[in-house]
Image (cartoon, rainbow, N blue to C red):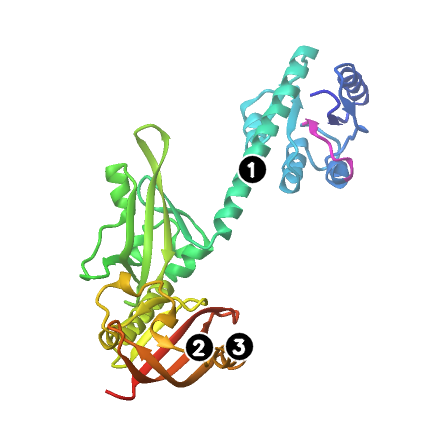
Amino acid sequence: MANKKILVVEDEHITAEYLGYRLKHLGYEVLPILKRGEDVIEQVGDLQPDLILMDIMLEGDMDGIEAAERVQQTHDIPVIYLTALSDPRTFERAKVTGSFAYLVKPFDDTQLHRTIEMTLYKNMLEQQIKESQKWFSTTLRSIGDGVIASDDTGRVKFINPAAVTILETAAEELTGQSWYTFCHLIDADTGERLSDPVEQVLSSKQQVDLDDRAALVLADERQKFVEVNASPIMVKPGIVNGVVMVIRDISRKKAVEEDLRIKDMAIASSINAMVIMDLSGNLTYANRSFRDLWGYDHPEDWMGVPSTHFWKMEEKADEIVESLLEDESWSGKLTAIRRDGSTFEVQYSMTMVVDDTNRPICLLASFVELSA
């Protein structure tokens, strides 16, 4: 890793100059030598070194250990301590600052070079890990599904904002606790309390999936329909180190499905004959009243068949199309054609169904028989 920028912090002038010479000989770029810890704090942002060689004993009120600690509060720069002292107390002070290495004077070029290279390599790996953690953390915090990660005892270690919203409990309250302390799951059909998926995974070492039959019961007894997937975290085969659980709120989806089910039942049970057609005029749905009135028993006899097969509209086709395009509806009288070929008069109402963007998606028609 030659051409890396090294900052030497050493208050003994001859020692500093000689160390700079040795570093240049090893292929490193040596930045201006500093003598005081205060100078390091002031200039490190402008110098942007890749590594700092920091003597522990420095001029001024700040020693090298304190200077390194201050630097690492704002910059991810590895530090190698240089000292003539090797007592345990000094070593412990240096260790807690998070420094990467420690060289006891005197040291030769081989020791110096090896320590710098290992420190730079270790720092590179740690930066890659930090970037990966940041990327994963940002991703997990950004996705719409709730994500909860627990340790091997079932205690929450991570929870993303979506999960906080679903559980309606602050992340600070959940962290370090079992999520089942604050809420629980039940079978949406029977109301039976379900086992904690996290505990199931920890005991079985298998993935647990709960489909849309599950409901989440909050602390205030309100319920939400949810889908849950819990999977084991395994660093080594057969050893579960934790559980990651994905929880999705499908209450809105369930409400829409129920609304559609009710509307489907209303159309199916209507005393008026009703059909749905695609935009080409082919039947895609016919309720019981239509099938009885027209005399059709089997879907294959009417499904996908052009509407002109069931009523006469040639004379009014232009009028109907123009009205649908302008007003999205048309009503009038038509002659209907039963399956056996007999005819009867109907009052006919047709509406163009559009989506949220006002794009036509199908045609809905209803009929009332005018003559028996």
Q: Position of residue 353 (x, y in %)?
A: 44, 73
Pointer 1 with pointer 2, Cβ within 8 A? no
In this rendering, position of residue 252 left or right of residue 355: left
- Pair 2/3: label in front: 2
* Secondary structure under the numbered disc 1 in the rendered image: helix
The alpha-carbon separation of the residues under discs 1 and 2 comes to 72 Å
Rendered image: mark on residue 150: none
Q: Position of residue 251 (x, y in %)?
A: 35, 64
* Quarter occupied by residue 120: top right
Mark 1 or mark 3: whose residue is earlier in sequence: 1
In this rendering, position of residue 86 left or right of residue 253: right
In this rendering, position of residue 212 left or right of residue 190: right
Residue matched to label 1:
130
Which amino acid, by three-letter code, is at mark 3?
Leu
Residue matched to label 3:
325
Which amino acid, by three-letter code, is at mark 1?
Lys
Total marks shown come to 3
The alpha-carbon separation of the residues under discs 2 and 3 comes to 17 Å
In this rendering, position of residue 341 left or right of residue 324: left
Is residue 66 in the magenta section? no
Depth check: give the residue in front, 136 or 305. Answer: 305
* Quarter occupied by residue 94: top right
Vertical arrangement, residue 365 with respect to residue 114, above or below: below
Density class for disc 2 (Cα within 10 Å; few <14, some 14-19, many ≥20) is: few
Residue matched to label 2:
314
Q: Which residues are magenta?
A: 46-55
Q: Residue at x 23, y 58 (%)?
A: 186
